[in-house]
Image (spheres, helix red, strand yellow):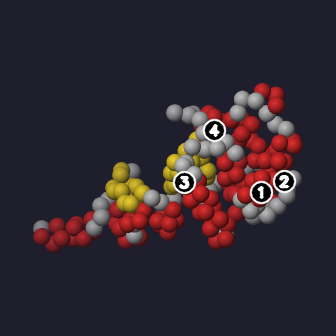
Amino acid sequence: MPRTRTEAARRNICLISGERGNGLMPDKSIAFNLSSVIVGARDWGSLGYSPKMALDRAARQIEALRIRSAPETPVGSLSAGGQQKVIIAKWLEIGPQVVLLDKPARGIDIGSKQEIYALIRQMAASGCIVLLHSKELSELMGLSDRILAFHQGRLAGEIAGADADGATLIKLITAGEPGGEARQTKRESAA
């Protein structure tokens, strides 16, 4: 089990959080931020950081993720959606096999959300194992092949993404079982 993000990155595992403060150096450029993970994850010795490689990496990811800025732009000057795309892009540089997402579209505009959702689908389609944690039911139902619902810290149920509906998920989360509220009411009325 990796104990640090660097150790996880070396094993091609990444964590992408909606807490942008944990994943960015706002006063540094997009190019520098995009290089921060791969330089630590790869054992390149003194050749770890090259300004030219950083600019090339940034140009490639800026185009691929449609980040509306230049590689030299400080990340702190980007919109919340642009900052989140930089976080995703820097982890994509390691070629992750496992992607852990914690509220990845939190606090961003609808256009950026849709672009990030497309990136998540693309990661899953490319063979990555993608685990998503979210409190937004529409996000879970729209992105998941399988949803595990928890109630009071325990697994309450599993639903195939295609079969997911908001009412069933809410019942699993709040009552601990599908239709749990209705069953409880019947038991109480029989007593």
Amino acid type indicated by mark 4: Ala
Residue highlighted by disc 3: 124
Kindly report the distance in space between the C-alpha atoms of the residues bearing marks 1 and 3.
21 Å
Kindly report the distance in space between the C-alpha atoms of the residues bearing marks 3 and 4.
18 Å
Q: Is residue 102 visible?
A: no
Q: Are marks 4 and 1 in contact (CB under 8 Å)?
A: no
Q: Position of residue 153 (x, y in %)?
A: 39, 51
Circle 4 packing at 10 Å, graded few (<14), some (14-19), many (20+), is: many
Residue highlighted by disc 1: 62
N-terminal label among 3 and 2: 2
N-terminal label among 1 and 3: 1
Amino acid type indicated by mark 1: Ile
Q: Position of residue 58 (x, y in %)?
A: 79, 51
Per the image, label 2 sits on a secondary structure element best described as: loop
- Tell me which residue sits at (74%, 37%) in the image: 39
Residue highlighted by disc 2: 71
Residue highlighted by disc 4: 9
- Tell me which residue sits at (38%, 66%) in the image: 163
Q: Are marks 1 and 2 in contact (CB under 8 Å)?
A: yes
Circle 2 packing at 10 Å, graded few (<14), some (14-19), many (20+), is: many
